[in-house]
Image: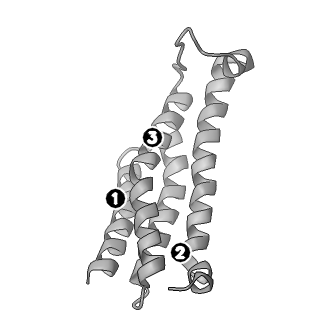
Amino acid sequence: MDAAALAASPFISLLAWSVVLLVFHVSLQGMMSTFELGSAWNAGPRDDERKPSGKLAGRAERASGNFQETYPAFVGLALALAIAGDPTGWGLTGAWLWFAFRIAYIPLYLAGVSYVRSLFWLGSLAGLLIMVSALVF
């Protein structure tokens, strides 16, 4: 695949948006921690190993960690589909499902919504599995 065709792939722009989502996760976690522990803690070396203990900061941290667990798989699959092609369009459908469910997951986790949040996580996993099947079959 030539560089122009690769650059035109919808997977490349979706990868760029996924980086925005990653930065949002990290920023949200940092803001929640700073709100709880203060800007001096955030700007300092954090040698005292204090960690935020509030619900929102903890949820933001866990949501970010959860995102980062599936993010490498998404990046790899999206790049593979951009290079190999996606003649059926199912790979792109799976990528958008992963992305949409990961966005919706954030407020569900912060609000402490049980079960529904897990369904949205399963939805994002289904998106990855659809991407895999588009590559394999």
Q: Residue furthest top?
A: 48
Q: Is residue 13 left or right of residue 106?
A: right
Amino acid at the residue labelled 1 = Leu
Give the vertical position of 100 relative to 37 (above or below). Answer: below
Q: Of marks 2 and 1, which one's residue comes earlier in the chain?
A: 2
Question: At label 2, which amino acid type do we have?
Answer: Phe
Q: Is label 1 in contact with label 3 (beta carbons under 8 Å)?
A: no
What secondary structure is found at the residue carrying circle 1? helix
Residue located farthest toward the bottom when viewing the structure as drawn: 87
What's the CA distance linking mark 1 and mark 3?
16 Å
The amino acid sitting under disc 3 is Gly
Which of label 2 and label 1 is nearer to you? 2
Q: Residue at x 38, y 59 (%)?
A: 73
For residue 49, above or below residue 55: above
Label for residue 65? 3
Q: Between residues 26 and 110, which one lies in front from this camera angle?
A: 26
- The residue indicated by pointer 1 is 122
Mark 2 vs mark 3, foreground winner is 2
